[in-house]
Amino acid sequence: MSTFKAPKGTYDLKPPTSAVYLAVREAIAAPLKRAGYGYVETPGFEQVELFSRGVGESTDIVTKEMYTLTTRGGDQLALRPEGTASVLRAALEGNLHKDGNLPVKLWYSGSYYRYERPQKGRYRHFSQVGAEAIGAEDPALDAELIILAVDAYKSLGLQNFRLLLNSLGDKECRPVYRAALQDFLRGLELDEDTRRRIEINPLRVLDDKREDVQKQLVGAPLFRDHLCEACKAYHDQVRELLTAAGVDFEDDPKLVRGLDYYTRTTFEFVHDGLGSQSAVGGGGRYDGLSEMIGGPALPSVGWALGVDRTVLALEAEGIALDLPSPTDVYAVPLGEEARKVLFGVVTELRRNGVATDFAFGGKGLKNAMKSANRSGARFAVIAGERDLAEGNVQLKDLESGEQKAVALTDVVGEVLAKQG
């Protein structure tokens, strides 16, 4: 037993489970690639100010959940708690918005870190796939991203997820709503931390999951009743485009999500089979974030989908992904000469795109064949001294048990032909 363990609230991905996670990531990314999104990768840590400005000083993410560190040079850094601010920073630093082709469409995949109370579906290290469309204000862009997420979930076979939709207005109508909400909240019986939040960002209170707070929020003013005409028209267009694309959604007037940068379109995907941690992904429009972190005005929209929770959603629905076997052919050499010859066959098969493994460690025939069966391979290539003397190897179908001699020079072509 190792004396070291994974830190509390984290996990290791190991075969065969890791293959499911990879398949989920690839399924989420596939619609994005078809829609012109290019891959971006950012560092695992950034300057603290990037998140405190962008995500919001009053959010739980910044005040309670960020992992921060001080370098030897005195720089204040934070492990990234979310992806949008980092991706926007990278796009601005790389001047991608100046190439003349807006929106800049980017997708990413990686690990993120938040100091939270660990429980099923909530980890301190978690995996997300995200997408950002930077530099365009267009309801069709909002609808596009939502549709791409829906298509990704459906491609995995998921059915029991719901799309919640809301609008958080813009700089014209949000101040009016903010004042109305503050007036309402000041009359409630709330703890001191929550009362301070009323003055900094009252929308955060709507996102409070505590039952005693939610009971008091009945009758709170709703944003939809305070939207300006422009925001109302924008939101109606998003809803119309989703409906035309056959995407079902539920209007949720209390949906604000946990980040300060959202404006107008805000959405969340929830799965009813996951209990309290029901959110599997979400996002929205963030038209002012670029200016918050020192960039020009670049209206943008994006989302992040949780890989961990998507895997849990698959399990909740009893969905087993149809994953290819990691090994198609398993080579079993009997003797030193056969080891040299079959190692060359293994290399040639791999170079022809066939997933092939080898009985390493000088195993005897019985143990080697057990390994071949455990590998999931369809075929075994077996060779001993007599086979090689005749210029042959034995090709065995591990499903049917059929075995036949094949000329050594023909074995690669024979395997390729059987694979179709």
Image (cartoon, rainbow, N blue to C red):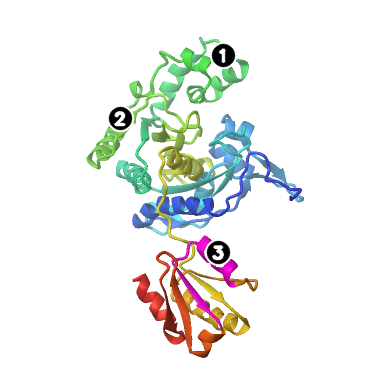
Q: Do the numbered discs 3 and 2 sit on residues whose CB atoms are within 8 Å?
A: no
* Residue 258 percent coordinates (x, y): 51, 32
* Foreground: disc 3 or disc 1: 3
Does residue 195 appear to the left or right of 4 in the view shown? left
The verdict on residue 369 being magenta is yes
Task: Classify residue 149 by image quadrant.
Answer: top left
For the residues labelled 3 and 1, the Cα–Cα distance comes to 65 Å
Q: In which quarter of the image is the C terminus?
A: bottom left
Residue found 51% across the figure and 63% down from its top: 373
Secondary structure beneath dot 2 equals helix
Q: Nearer the viewer, residue 296 or 354?
A: 354
Structural crowding at the residue carrying mark 1, measured as other residues with C-alpha within 10 Å and reported as few (<14), some (14–19) or many (≥20) = some
Residue position for label 3: 370
Quick one: label 3 or label 2, which is nearer the N terminus?
Answer: 2
Residue assigned mark 2: 232
**Residue 190: assigned label:** 1
Q: What residue type is labelled 3?
A: Lys
Q: What stretch is highlighted in magenta?
A: 365-384
Disc nearest the viewer among 1 and 2? 1
